[in-house]
Structures are given as structure tokens and as C-alpha cells.
Amino acid sequence: MDKGTGLRPVILIIALVSFCEGRVVKVPVGPLVHVEGQAVSIHCDVSDYQGPRDQEFEWSLVLPGNNFLHLISTFDGNFADSSVRDRVNSGDISYKRLGDAAVELKFKKIRATDSGMYRCSTPSTDSVISGNYHDDVELKVIGDSLKVAPAIPKSAVSEGESVELQCNATRGFTEHTFLSVTWSIRKGSSPLEEILTFGPDDKIKVGRNYFRRYTDGGLLLDLRGGGFYGLVLKRARPSDQGEYVCVAQEWVRQGEEGRNWRMILEKSEEMGNVTVTPTELQFKVTLTASLNPQSTSEPTELRCEVVDLLHLQDGRLGVTWSYSTNTSGDVSQKKLTIASLNEQGALIADSQYQQRLDTGDIAVTRRESNIFILRMLQTRDADMGSYSCAVTAWKPTQQSGWEKAMEVQSTPVTVQWTPKIPDLQVVAHRVREASTAGSTFEMSCRVTGQNLKNPGYSVLIRFEETLGGKSRKVLSLSQDSVLQLEEWSEPSRIDSVVLEKTGQLEYRFRLYGAQVTDRGLYYCDVTAWTRHQSQDWIKAISAESNKIEIAFVHTGPVFNISIHSEANNVLPGNTVQMKCIISILQASPNTGDMAFEVRWFQKTDRAVDNGVQPLISMDRWGVVKKTDSNDTSLERIDRNTFVLSLHKIKDRDVGEYYCSATPWLLSPATGAWNKEKDLTSASSSLSVKTEFWESLMMPVGYGLAAAVIAGLLSVLLGLAVAHCCFSRNPIHTPRPRNKLMDLDMD
Ligand SMILES: *[C@@H]1O[C@H](CO)[C@@H](O)[C@H](O)[C@H]1NC(C)=O
Ligand SMILES: *[C@@H]1O[C@H](CO)[C@@H](O)[C@H](O)[C@H]1NC(C)=O
Ligand SMILES: *[C@@H]1O[C@H](CO)[C@@H](O)[C@H](O)[C@H]1NC(C)=O
Ligand SMILES: *[C@@H]1O[C@H](CO)[C@@H](O)[C@H](O)[C@H]1NC(C)=O
Ligand SMILES: *[C@@H]1O[C@H](CO)[C@@H](O)[C@H](O)[C@H]1NC(C)=O
């Protein structure tokens, strides 16, 4: 080193000053550091010499006390010291000419004991001894003590975790040599890719593909000293998976002022494989029906479980329950959201299901961190279909919010059963037969219901005069036991029908004093009702019983009813009378005491009820009831004749009139009054002479009317005089009364 820095410039200056004078022998600047066992060559050249171009060289080891151990010479085969002759003979120590004035001393395998100061000398061929004839260089042979011990404390990590790559590198001698450590990765069959190198002069060199990550703070060096070299890959990615290799290198400085680095030793160790599990949610959602209803109103419980839950870390899970009307195979069915639990655990219900969720009929809950439950307390027929759950994983965002990371859909589960169709049967049987008019009829109806949950029954007694004819409601008993007369409205016979519940599923109908008009078919019309919890009754099913007939033989008298009107066309203000005459065409043994109910009707456009307006009636005791105006009256002028009087005839009295009568006979056998069939008369029309009257009312027509009347009067007067004078014949055709009235008016 001293030579290099101090002597050489001096020699150079001398050489320049004494032009072309002074030999220069030169070896590299030392110390030369080599590792034992390696091949070593030491260069030596000579310049500025005189004599032959070919120069000879001698290599010796400088020993203490200015002694030398001769090694090898280019011209003297016996130059070598006996202690090294074997090595020279075996070629372990040799030389190589590089030219006329340059040579290399070569060691095939340097030994630790070869350390020392080596001298390259040249015998003089100069005329004058001038310059230097030898040069020395120090060779240091160090042992191969570099040791690399790699370790990866955790070789299986999840995405986002850190991977620690520890590489302990130690060596025995630290003088003159420097260490570098390189971490590399091999992914599959790709070539080794350098991640980072530390050293040999405390510098950091980052691999091309890792530069960005290094500047982002994703690569961290852990240098604790004592040969510990650690590299931490923060926030591992799936691409960090691979085989890691650690390389330690020992370096020496060389060249002018030690500016160049020369690597003298390298040790490479495989650190091991690192697996990075992606943190994406995988994992799987299973949906099972823990309670599957077998019939309507049974509970349903569906369990949506997230299995193999990995890498959620501080993420959260939400769920969305869906329903579609049919099984999985049918894609045409639209999916309907029932409700979802969001990342905050809040329940968001669909409007269609809101009410059932509010009442608790449907519950959406979370049982454990990874199990979601959908429960229906009372499954309805309309709930049949397929159900699925979708689990959503939420991850926290930098802005302390949540973002959807993943959504996994379960396979659907079918909730289906064969609905038990409600069934209702009603059987009627006769309890008491009405064999004659006035006797009591009684029938009972037995109800049998199936597949009805907590049913209630309502019973309606219906009546048909002839089989398949128009049916009339008689009376009913509701599911809440309310008895109601329906179309049984005869005031005098209200108490003659009874309907009662006589057993759990048995109802009895009784009709006292059966009349001729009661003859026909009776049956029970039963409706089964069900109700959910405390809610209203829901109609489930209806059924009719068989029909029971009241068919006693009646041999009563035969009646005829007729109507007689004295006038059909009248002037306003007049009174008209019409007679309703009931005659007995054919008497019978029953014909004893007899009474009639008579009713008068008007058929008119104004009337609401089928154009028929009831006017006035008389019951069998003679009590008259008016319905409309005070200008009608009804009187019985003999046993069978009922006269209707219409007073103060008005426009509105125009129409058809008829009467109807119900005969009642007192049965000598039972002493009860029995009703015969209703009789209805033909109708009679009534018109009012409105046109003539109105023309009279017109002021313009007064004169004309007066003239016509005067003319008429004179003609009549003439006729009367003629009659009086020329004929006293008392026989004459009776004038209609209304004609006379015309005259009276005048
Ligand atoms: C590396 O060195 C550290 C500290 O000296 C030591 O704790 C660790 O066990 C060494 N690792 C190996 C693989 O030798
Ligand atoms: C790493 O994995 C590769 C491929 O599976 C295998 O060939 C190699 O031996 C493994 N290395 C170590 C150190 O286990
Ligand atoms: C689903 O559809 C099939 C035919 O595609 C039908 O037979 C079945 O009854 C349906 N089920 C429901 C619950 O609607
Ligand atoms: C019933 O009375 C009407 C009207 O007077 C008459 O035309 C009819 O022939 C009578 N019927 C019988 C069967 O006598
Ligand atoms: C019928 O006459 C009674 C008593 O004369 C009277 O109070 C009632 O208002 C009259 N009704 C009509 C509809 O004219």
C-alpha cells in the first residue's frame, strides 16, 4: 500500500526525468485476499528495460529476516526450494507467460499457509543497473468460513400478513472482507428473481420488480447484528408464493485505492417454500331446512351456514333471504327478497313481508357468527316454493366505512308439502215428519269436517219449493251462535221456525204448524270457518246436505180469484172502485171456517220493486194496512168480496191493478188455522183522461172549447126536446156514469 501511494509516483517521476532509463517491475497492489482452496494467479510485468525483449522472472516468498523461499523461475528449473518442489512438480504451483515481459504466478489450490509477501524479480539485462528489479505484493489466504443459515418462521401465511425471511450469514475473519446478502424468489419454473441485496458496503439494491413495493414501505430490512439479516415482506400477496433463496457473498476491495469490489466467496441456501392463501372469501354457504313443514300452519326453519370461514379478519357478514315461487329447476320464476341483515346487523324487510316480520310470524336472526336463521311460525300454502340465502362479506374501508367484498349464494331449498284439502260433509235426516197441515216438521244435520284447523261452523236452512227450483233462505245460525231469520218474514209465523245446535257437530231445524205453502224441500247449507290466532274467521269450505221433503197431501177446497173494475178510463179527481172476488169452485171436507188475507197491487213504471207497488192490504182479522197514500181504501163487502177504492184520481194512478189473496182454513181436526196457496188475480188497467183535461186548461183553447160545448148543449137540448115531444118510450140504454159526470162538470 505504501508503495502504491508513495513510491510509485516517485519512480514514475525518476523514469520521466531519466528518459528511457530505469527498469520497472510491477505486481498488483495488495493485499490480495483469497480463500483457501481457490485458484490464484498473481500478475507481474516488467518495462523500461534494456537488452533482449524476452525477460525472465523469478517468484519467491519473502521470509522474516530478509530471507527468501524460492518458488519458481522462468529460466532455472531447480529454482524451487525443496519444501515446495513437490507442489511445483505436480503443477500446483506454476507460472504462465503472458507475453515477452509479463508473467503470472499460479496456484491451483491456494493454502492458508500460502499467506505472505510475494516477490517478483527480474535478472538484469540492462547495461547499467537502473530502476527496480523486483516488486512485492501481499497475499492473504483466508479460510472458507462463510456460513448461511436461513429460516422462515411462518411459511404459510394469509394474504395481507407479513412474510419474514431470515438469513443468518457469518464468517470467521472479518478483516479486509465484506458481506452482502441477497434474497431471491423462484416462482414455479421461472428463473430466480432478485428481491433485494444488502451490502457489501451497507448499500441496498432492490430488484426491478420490487422497487415500487420498496418505496411504498412494503419491504423492511431487519438487521439486528450478529450475522442476522432479515427481510420482511409486508402485506403478502398471492404472488409472493414461491421458493425463497438466500445468497451470502464475501467481497474484497481492490484496485486503485480499493475502488473496485471483487467477490471472493458466495454461498447460496434455499430458504424454503412460502404459501400465501388468498384472503378472498371462499368458502361456501350451505342452506338446510332444519324444520320443514309437512302441512299448512306448521313452522319452517331454514339455516344458512357459512362454512370454512377464513380471512374475514375484522370483516363482517350480512345475509339476504330470497324466495321464488317454484323449485330450483324453474328459472322463469322471479326471485323475491324477504329480508336482509346488513353489515350493521340491521334488518331490512321487503314491504310484502313487513307485516309478518312485524308480528313475529317471520323472524330473521343470526345464531352464531356464521349461522343465519329464517323462521316462519305458521307456514302458509302460499309460502311453498324455493328459498335461498346470499351471504355478503363486508370489509372495512380506509374511510371507516364498509365495502362489499364478496357475496356467496346458497343453493336453493324447496319448502313444499301436499296440502291437505279441507273436506266438509253434511248429512240431513228427518226427525219428525209433517204428515198433515199444521203438524210439526223437524230435521237434523250432522257435520263432518276434515283437515280443518280449529273450525267453526255456520248453518243456513234453505228451502226449495220444487227440486232444483229457486232456493230461499229460511234462517241461520252463525259460527258465533247468532240466530237470524233470513227470508222468513211472515210476521205471524216468526216463532214457528227454530234452529239450534244440539251436539258438537249436530244442528236441528224445527218448523211448527206446517202450512201448505211450506211444502217443499229443506236442507242445511253449512260453511266451515277457520281462524289464525286471534284473527277474523276465514271461510274455508261450504257444503250442502241432502234434501228432506215436507210433502203432506192436502185436499183443501179449490178457489178462484177474479177482479172487476167499474171503469177503466176516468177523469182526474174522480173515485174508482175495483172488486176482488174470491169464489170457492170446489168445496172439500175441510171447508169449514175460512178467512182471507187480501192485498192490492199496482203495476206502474214508477214502482221500484219489479214495477209492482203494494197499495193496501187486509189481514185475515180484517185489519187494513196502507202503504202509500190516504187516497186508497179497502173494505170487505161480503165474505168473499174486497173492494178497493181509489179516491181523487191523479195521473200517477194510471196502471194495471190486481189483487192477491191467501185463504186460511180452520182445520176441524187440529183446531189450527192452515194457510192455503196464494191466489193472484188477473189485472185490470186504469187510464186517466189527461189530454182532454189539459186542452181545457189551455187558455188559447178556452174559446173553442166554449163554442164546442155550446154547440153540444144545443144539440142535446134539441135531442131532449125531440125525445120529450115525440117519444115517451122509457126504455133507453143506460149511459155510462162517467158520461153523466162529464155533464155534471159542465
Ligand atoms: C439467526 O440468528 C439469530 C440471532 O442471532 C438467532 O436467534 C437465530 O436462531 C438464527 N437463525 C438460524 C436459522 O440460525
Ligand atoms: C418448494 O416447492 C417446490 C415445488 O413444489 C419443490 O420442488 C421444492 O423442493 C420445495 N422446496 C423446499 C425447500 O421445500
Ligand atoms: C313448480 O313447477 C312445476 C312444473 O314446472 C309444478 O309441477 C309444481 O307444482 C310447481 N310447484 C310449485 C310449488 O308451484
Ligand atoms: C175464474 O174467474 C174468471 C173471471 O171471472 C173466469 O174467467 C174463469 O173462468 C174462472 N175460472 C174457473 C175455473 O171457473
Ligand atoms: C193520511 O192521513 C193522516 C190523518 O188523516 C195524516 O196524518 C197523514 O199525513 C196522511 N198521509 C198521507 C200520505 O197523506
Image (cartoon, grey):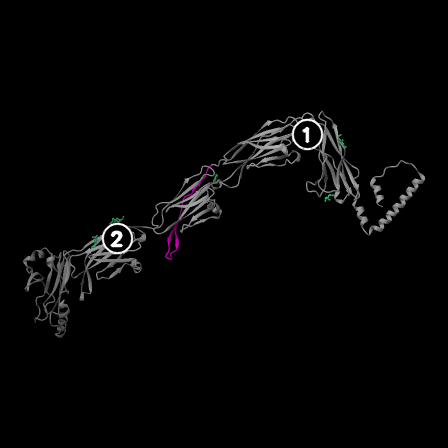
Residue furthest to the bottom in view is 17
User: Which element is circle 2 on?
Assistant: strand
Label 2 crowding class (10 Å Cα cut-off): few <14, some 14-19, many 20+? many
User: Which element is circle 1 on?
Assistant: strand
Which residue in the structure is indicated by mark 2? 244
Does 198 appear above or below 376?
A: below
Taking the image as drawn, is residue 191 in sight? Answer: no
Q: Kindly identify the amino acid type of the residue bearing the numbered disc 1.
A: Asn
Quadrant in the picture for the N terminus: bottom left
Nearest the eye: 209 or 567 = 567
Region of the chain picked out in magenta, as a range: 392-417
Q: Main secondary structure of the magenta part?
A: strand
* Mark closer to the chain start, 2 or 1: 2
Nearest the eye: 444 or 242 = 444
The residue at 60%/27% (across/down) is 432
Circle on res. 674: 1
Residue furthest to the right in view is 725
Q: Residue 52, position in %: x, y?
A: 10, 67
